[in-house]
Image (spheres, rainbow, N blue to C red):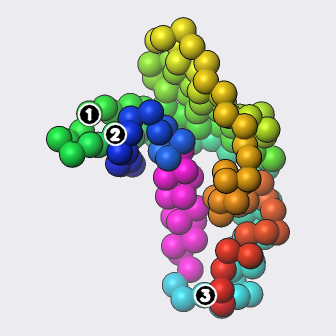
Amino acid sequence: MRCTLLEKKNRIFCFYHLIWTSVFLLLSFLPSVSAQEIKEAFESLKKFQNWQVEFREEIVEKGGVIERREGKIYFEKPLRFKISYQDGNEVLSDGTYIYFVRKDKNKVYVRELRDEVSENLIVEILRGSDRVFDFFFV
């Protein structure tokens, strides 16, 4: 996975990129789809209550790759997850807040999952919400 960031602090973009890539790969097996096929694909995704995956990411700026990391994502509906990086840093969500745990700096940053986050297709897919169909025009 390759994340391009304008600001290194904007780590949530990488999370969305990783999740979006996962969803895209799941849906890419459907060549050209009808509204019913989209609905069936999302219904099958809703059956997954939890999953985990290992990943590698590169953070790239204009000068090239500035950071390479590996880790694991553990996910459980509704919108609870843990992203563990090899360096010990973590991103956690209890479904209401996102916690960025920087063990290397001995700090925790907290952000509420408000409307600007929840109005995101990826977040709605992960919640298992029927609102995902509001994002499509078929």
Tell me which numbered mark, 2 or 3, is placed earlier along the sequence: 3
Q: Answer above or below: position of 99 versus 52.
A: above
| Side (left or right) of 72 relative to 97 | left
Q: Residue 59 carries which label?
A: 2
SS state under label 1:
strand
Q: Which mark is residue 33?
A: 3
Main secondary-structure element of the magenta-colored stretch: helix
Q: Name the residue under label 1.
A: 66
SS state under label 2:
strand
Tell me what residue is drawn at x 65 percent, y 63 percent. Answer: 121
Q: Magenta residues, as a range?
A: 15-30
Tell me which numbered mark, 2 or 1, is placed earlier along the sequence: 2
| Side (left or right) of 123 relative to 65 | right
Nearer the observer, 20 or 134? 134
Mark closer to the observer (2, 3)? 2
Residue 92 locus on image (x, y percent): 66, 30
- Observer able to see residue 123: no
Residue 14 locus on image (x, y percent): 47, 45
Disc 2/disc 3 C-alpha distance (Å): 33 Å
